[in-house]
Image: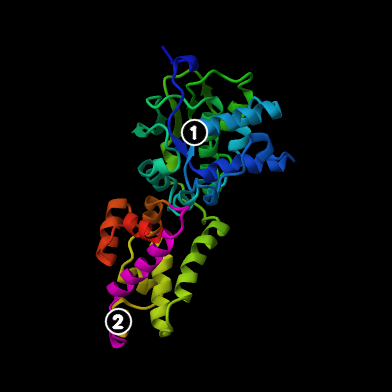
């Protein structure tokens, strides 16, 4: 029998603080002082919650806003306003993936950076891919779930630049809203409540859909950090600076190889190797030194977790970044950050 809302324990877990900012922006757009209504200012690194926000508090804020707005469908309305920047660094990383399938794979691997409540299960069967969240860590509530699922579908539509993307089905564990019509119109599919898990089913064909270019503002913010770092380096030849900039730009896309950098500089790997050698430089050392400097700058930012820094440096696993940072500095990323403090 499907689980009912009253049978489930309250949820335990956290969501990104940048995601919570979505509600404050939504209220401001309606002329409402979110800080006064919710009893606290928008979350920010300076307030001691750099990237994590208790889901119970998030649920209370949503319920208070829904009562004030007299909006039973606030989750649906709020989730539709999401942009990649509301997911923080992960928003950019997902957006920079080549296809929707690649983005979902990254979401599955790093889902705790986006929604650390219940584990995401990704399943493919026949021509359908299913994203499913159970209730093993409790139930966050109807508004939390509906905001999250609407935001996920909106994100997929935005990054593929296809507003008409339809899903096969959506399931929620909670009691239904007063009217389901708006939900069915938005998702373009069957929407069921009081189910045994929260699910989104997508046609498998959507996974091959290419993503449009990442959000320019978010990309600019990350690139500015790298540019600031490069500007602090001592004067060097044009080739060294060109290679460093190419490395910094390529880090976010994954493996940084001599071949890939040479291609970006419109030369052959052999020619680039020879020109660097003439300057007494080795590509691998130059790449690792650039990576180390950028890593140290990111680690100095309290708004980024170590896992997020690893993502920004192109590592698919946090453990691989930790090993590399140890080779470069003799310390772990956490020990380096503690030393800064």
Give the camera-side residue of 93 and 260. Answer: 93
Q: Residues within 10 Å of mark 2 (few under 14, many from 20)?
A: some
Q: Quadrant of residue 321?
A: bottom left
Q: In the rendered image, is residue 20 in sight?
A: yes
| Overall secondary structure of the magenta section | helix
Q: Quadrant of the C terminus?
A: bottom left
Q: Quadrant of residue 118?
A: top left
**Image point 53% across, 33% down: which residue?**
57
**Image point 37% across, 60% down: which residue?**
313
Label 2: state its secondary structure.
Answer: loop
Q: Residues within 10 Å of mark 1 (few under 14, many from 20)?
A: many
Q: Does the magenta segment cover residue 289? A: yes
Q: Which mark is residue 188?
A: none
Q: Which residues are magenta?
A: 276-304
Question: Does residue 308 sit above or below 121 in this rendering?
Answer: below
**Image point 54% across, 42% down: which residue?**
19
Residue position for label 1: 55
Question: Does residue 46 sit above or below 111 in this rendering?
Answer: below
**Image point 29% across, 88% down: which residue?**
278
Counting from the top left corner in percent of width and height, residue 151 is at: 54, 38
Q: Earlier in the sequence, mark 2 or mark 1?
A: 1
Counting from the top left corner in percent of width and height, residue 276 is at: 31, 82
Residue position for label 2: 281
Q: Quadrant of the N terminus?
A: top left
Q: How many numbered marks does the figure carry? A: 2
Counting from the top left corner in percent of width and height, residue 272 is at: 32, 80
Q: In the rendered image, is residue 259 in sight?
A: no
Q: Give the Cα separation between the discs numbered 2 and 1.
A: 50 Å
Question: Does residue 57 sit above or below 208 in this rendering?
Answer: above
Counting from the top left corner in percent of width and height, residue 24 is at: 63, 41
């Amino acid at each position: 029998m499907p689980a009912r809302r009253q049978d489930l324990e309250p949820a335990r877990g956290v969501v990104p603080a940048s995601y919570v900012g979505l509600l404050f922006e939504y209220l401001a757009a309606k002329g409402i002082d979110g800080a006064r209504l919710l009893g606290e200012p928008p979350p920010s690194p300076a307030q001691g919650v750099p990237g994590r926000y208790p889901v119970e508090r998030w649920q209370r804020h949503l319920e208070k806003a829904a009562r004030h707005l007299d909006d039973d469908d606030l989750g649906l309305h709020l989730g539709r306003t999401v942009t990649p920047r509301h997911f923080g660094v992960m928003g950019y990383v997902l957006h920079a993936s080549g296809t929707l399938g690649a983005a979902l794979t990254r979401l599955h691997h790093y889902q705790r950076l986006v929604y650390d409540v219940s584990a995401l299960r990704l399943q493919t069967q026949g021509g359908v891919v299913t994203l499913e969240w159970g209730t093993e860590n409790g139930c966050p509530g109807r508004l939390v779930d509906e905001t999250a699922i609407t935001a996920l579908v909106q994100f997929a539509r935005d990054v593929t630049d296809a507003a008409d993307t339809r899903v096969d089905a959506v399931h929620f564990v909670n009691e239904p809203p007063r009217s389901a019509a708006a939900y069915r119109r938005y998702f373009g599919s069957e929407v069921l409540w009081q189910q045994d898990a929260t699910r989104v089913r997508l046609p498998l064909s959507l996974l091959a859909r290419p993503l449009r270019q990442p959000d320019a503002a978010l990309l600019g913010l990350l690139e500015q950090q790298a540019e600031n770092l490069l500007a602090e380096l001592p004067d060097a030849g044009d080739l060294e600076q060109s290679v460093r900039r190419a490395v910094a730009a390529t880090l976010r896309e994954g493996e940084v190889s001599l071949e890939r950098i040479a291609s970006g500089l419109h030369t052959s790997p052999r020619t680039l190797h020879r020109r660097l050698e003439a300057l007494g430089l080795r590509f691998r050392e130059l790449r690792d030194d650039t990576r180390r400097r950028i890593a140290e700058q990111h680690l100095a930012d309290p708004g980024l977790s170590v896992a997020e820094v690893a993502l920004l440096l192109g590592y698919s696993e946090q453990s691989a970044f930790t090993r590399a940072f140890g080779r470069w500095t003799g310390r772990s990323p956490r020990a380096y950050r503690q030393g800064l403090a």
